[in-house]
Image: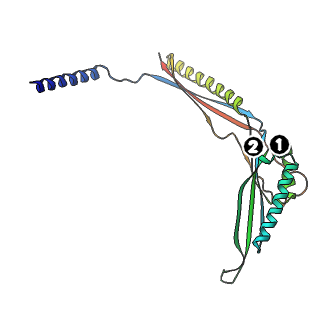
Amino acid sequence: MKKKLVVIVLALVAMLALSACSTSPNKPYPQITGSGTGTVYLSPDVAYVYIGVQTRSEDVAKALDDNNAKANAISKKLKELGVDAKDIQTSAFNIYPTASEFGPMGEALSYEYVVDNTVYVTVRDLPNLGNLLNAVVKAGANSINGVSYDVLDKEAAFNEARQVAIDNAKKTASDMASAVGVKLGKLTSVYVYQSGNVTPMYDVKGYGIGGGSVPVSSGQLALTVNADLTYEIK
């Protein structure tokens, strides 16, 4: 008898649950999402550059000694030009053999050793960047690559671009609501994100640079922020 009563109770619970589902359908609430973009242009205040030295010799010790001498001369020159020691960072150091002479069948007859030493340098005195690159080439650098620019403090620019993006998103949502004859209700979601990279690249190949300063241009950086605002429709 008790078991039968339990079965009846469970059946009634199930029926009530089904009844609740049928009388309260989960309908999506009508919404409008407006998107906006804000872009702020900045002048860079710092540059990053890879400066390298490559030496070769059939004697690995000589190749290494020559490389060390030139690398030390470059480091000394950078410090003389106002670059702090903490802004000079070794990014790659490699020693490897390579064939220097080949036989009639393409076989290697002799080898030489190659030493590559590259440092990653932060340059904070941008007006002096061209002179600095020319000076390190004269000091022994034979590879300069990937000069890139940045702004150290982008918080104010990001805040400005974000506000512009949000204002534009509000206007877009309002314009769409007016176009379809409805009114905006409660704001239900806000999504703000930075799009793209704010640092353009400018490559310089530092092989055989002569007198004068190296011609480099920092240009401008564009910081772009996007915003998506979603509203209920009244």
Given the image, on which type of amino acid does mark 2 rest? Answer: Tyr
Expressed as whole percent of the image width and height from the top left, the position of residue 154 reads: 71, 33
Q: What numbered label is drawn on residue 70?
A: none
Q: Is residue 102 visible?
A: yes
Give me the residue at 79% from left, 64% from top.
Answer: 67
| Quadrant in the picture for the N terminus | top left
Residues 54 and 221: in front is 54
Give me the residue at 11% from left, 25% from top.
Answer: 4
Give me the residue at 75% from left, 34% from top.
Answer: 42
Expressed as whole percent of the image width and height from the top left, the position of residue 123 reads: 80, 45
Give me the residue at 82% from left, 47% from top.
Answer: 216
Please state the total of marks drawn on the protein image: 2
Expressed as whole percent of the image width and height from the top left, the position of residue 110 reads: 72, 79
Disc 2 marks which residue? 149
Disc 1 marks which residue? 126
Whether pointer 1 and pointer 2 mark residues with C-beta atoms closer than 8 Å, the reply is yes
Compared to 91, does 55 lie above or below? below
Given the image, on which type of amino acid does mark 1 rest? Answer: Leu
Looking at the image, residue 231 sits to the left or right of residue 161; the answer is left
Extreme-right residue of the structure = 211
Extreme-bottom residue of the structure = 104
Residues 21 and 99: in front is 99
Q: Residues within 10 Å of mark 2 (few under 14, many from 20)?
A: many
Q: Residues within 10 Å of mark 1 (few under 14, many from 20)?
A: some
Extreme-left residue of the structure = 1
Q: Secondary structure at mark 2?
A: strand
Q: CA distance from mark 1 to mark 2?
A: 9 Å
Q: Is residue 121 visible?
A: no
Q: Secondary structure at mark 1?
A: helix
Residues 139 and 68: in front is 68
Upstream in sequence: badge 1 or badge 2: 1
Expressed as whole percent of the image width and height from the top left, the position of residue 62 reads: 80, 70
